[in-house]
Amino acid sequence: MNEEKKLYPFDLSINEVEIEVDAAEGSVVAARMRKPTDGEEFAREEQSSVKYAELNNGKEESVTVIGSSADGRMFDNIATELKGFVLHGEDEALGMDWRPATPELLAEIPLNYKQTFIGGTRIFTAKLIKNKSKVVVLGGPRISHVNFTVGNEKAPAYALDFYVPLPSESEREQFNRAASEFSVSKEEKGTSFLRFNLRPCVEHFDKLMLKTNDANIIGGTVNGKSWSECTTVIEKQQFLDAISPVIKHRVLTTVMGQYNAKLRD
């Protein structure tokens, strides 16, 4: 008997993440976090960037993700309950059950824990399902199929399928100009920075999904309703509003990535 496929609730209000502190002792800490608002996601991304630095006269490159403090600020804003944490002098029994995420507790939690908790809410994999043909087929249905998993890729908690209408050339150019910013450091030679902008990703994703009736999202719900059950533009926009900007960014960059081209060696 086949197990019924779990549907991912895009409007899930609380995420729960556990961190293994000591495997031998069975020590675990956990946090419950409310879903961030779009504004909070935009702010986090604006405070984060990727630093590229040339090493050994350009023979090697160092890549550093800058923005752990942004994760710390987001965690402090969205954490609602904690488990496994006690303050110095408190009875350890207090940490055995869920307790409110008070400012006193949040102030003492190490930044790397906060970063790991935030990362645990966005373990996603997006893969473009390509046509197995050995040639490039031009024209025809203009839909990209992206398989999207939530959780461990080998045993995901949820598996979804996004069918995203292909963007026109002008839409693709607009997205590429707005979705990321690249800058070169004047102080550090051979150093550059890349920052992604989530807001344009949200706008472009929503626009594409409302472009034709061929767009589809399978495996997810909003208020218990699937995408196919949304029959009006208003209902579809409400469905899209519930999808995290992080998910939209991952799906859309996967769709756009199929246009990358390089010369054959």
Image (tube, rainbow, N blue to C red):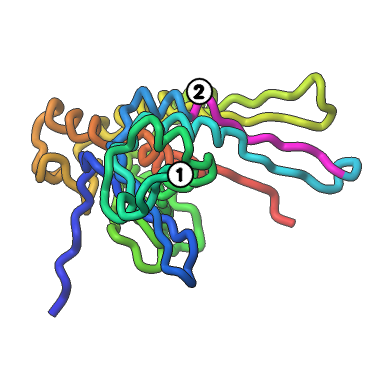
Residues rendered magenta in the picture:
45-55
Q: CA distance from mark 1 to mark 2?
A: 48 Å
In the picture of the structure, the residue carrying the numbered disc 2 is 178
SS label for mark 2:
helix
Disc nearest the viewer among 1 and 2? 1
Q: Main secondary structure of the magenta part?
A: strand
Q: Is residue 48 magenta?
A: yes
* Left or right side of 204 for 51: right
> Residue 151 sits in which quadrant?
bottom left
* Left or right side of 86 for 225: left
Q: Is residue 75 magenta?
A: no
Q: Nearer the viewer, residue 98 or 2?
A: 98
In the picture of the structure, the residue carrying the numbered disc 1 is 88
* Left or right side of 62 for 239: left
Q: Earlier in the sequence, mark 1 or mark 2?
A: 1
Residue 147 visible in the displayed image = no
Residue 30 on image: x %, y %: 36, 51
Q: Nearer the viewer, residue 120 or 20?
A: 20
Give the tally of numbered discs: 2
- On screen, residue 20 above or below 38: below
The residue under the point 67% across, 40% down is: 64
The residue under the point 44% across, 52% down is: 137
Residue 115 on image: x %, y %: 49, 42
SS label for mark 1:
loop
Quadrant of the frame with the C terminus? bottom right
Residue 6 visible in the displayed image = yes
Label 2 sits on what residue type? Ala
The residue under the point 34% across, 43% down is: 142
Q: Residue furthest top?
A: 186
Q: Residue furthest bottom?
A: 1
Quadrant of the frame with the N terminus? bottom left
Residue 107 on image: x %, y %: 46, 33
